[in-house]
Amino acid sequence: MRLFDTHCHLGDEKLREHSAELLEQAVSAGVEALTVICADPENIREFDSFIPKLRALNKNITVYRSAGLHPHEAQHASPELYQLIESQLQSDAIGVGETGLDFFYDFSKPDVQIPVFEKHIDWSVQYNKPLIIHCREAAKDTLRLLNRPDVISKQNPGILHCFTETLDTAKQLVDWNFMISFSGILTFNNATDLREVAKWVPDTHLLIETDSPYLAPKPHRGRTNQPAYVAHTFELLCQLRGQSPEELSEILWHNSQKVFGL
């Protein structure tokens, strides 16, 4: 059994100093690969040096990275940051983002977020790399902006990460070949509707993640999340879908490799 944490923030200050220990614990939990998400100006400027150091810490786990700017940080978009993101997409970044829209928080205004998201969509098409999408209280506009022929015609247009939207939204995204990724939220007591979505998603469109250091699953809820905890979400997903760990782990591994073009 092998697991792929498709979305974690090991560059976050809560995790960075403990990287070696966290990678070791991830390996012990069956995690053989993870994607470290670029989300803010500090990540954009530091990942070219940080990621190689992270990769050197443990040869038993494969560390990938993305390049992008989180919607919370859209107000900080600049030609300098755009140039750095593009250079990383031309190099070893395997995904575009974390990008998207967040109308729940007010860190960046919607009219600031939207053009930044559109820029990431353009990059995804230009460099043929999947979008890694954050969506909170913005499903209508997210779908509207994704509904482009050059996006929805792609075999692997991207991932709706940390999915918390409705079944109807999931169905539309699957029709457009997007992957649906579930985090530790799936284990929360109030996630009844989300668990129904997780039962429905076709095998071909399913992913898991931690979004660490955020959203630790039960039984670690309220603590700092880490890649090893993806095993708890995986265990619940096996139960919900009636699939064996061996079967589901191979499905998820294949999907992770496919969406990132590995």
Image (cartoon, rainbow, N blue to C red):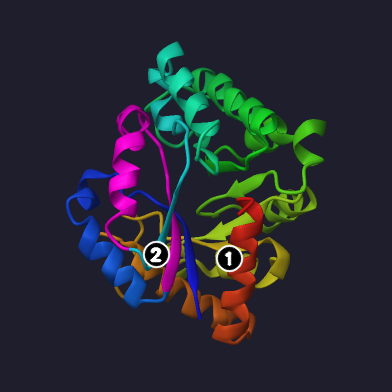
Q: Is residue 119 above or below residue 233?
A: above
**Magenta highlight range:** 31-58
What is the distance, in whole Å, between disc 1 and disc 2 at their CAs?
33 Å
Image x and y of residue 57, in percent: 27, 58
Residue carrying label 2: 61
Q: What residue appears at the point 57 percent right and 70 percent down from the top-left corner?
A: 195
Q: What residue appears at the point 43 percent right and 18 percent down from the top-left corner?
A: 77
Image x and y of residue 134, in percent: 51, 42
Q: Quadrant of residue 143?
A: top right
Viewport quadrant of the C terminus: bottom right
- Of the two numbered discs 1 and 2 in the rendering, the one whose residue sits closer to the viewer: 2
Q: What residue appears at the point 47 percent right and 18 percent down from the top-left corner?
A: 83
Q: Amino acid at mark 2?
A: Ile
Is residue 136 visible from the viewing direction of this image?
no
Specify which label sits upstream in the sequence, 1 or 2: 2
Mark 1: few/some/many CA within 10 Å (<14, 14-19, 20+): few
Q: Is residue 104 above or below residue 212?
A: above
Q: Amino acid at mark 1?
A: Asp
Image x and y of residue 48, in percent: 36, 35
Q: Is residue 143 above or below residue 224?
A: above
Residue carrying label 1: 193
> SS class of the residue under badge 1?
helix
Verify whether residue 171 appears in magenta: no
- Choose between 81 and 91: the one closer to the eye: 91
- Choose between 50 and 259: the one closer to the eye: 50
Verify whether residue 33 appears in magenta: yes
Q: What residue appears at the point 53 percent right and 32 percent down from the top-left corner?
A: 89
Is residue 118 visible from the viewing direction of this image?
yes
Mark 2: few/some/many CA within 10 Å (<14, 14-19, 20+): some
How many labels, in total? 2
Judge from the rendering whether residue 159 lies leftward or rightward of residue 148; answer left or right.
left
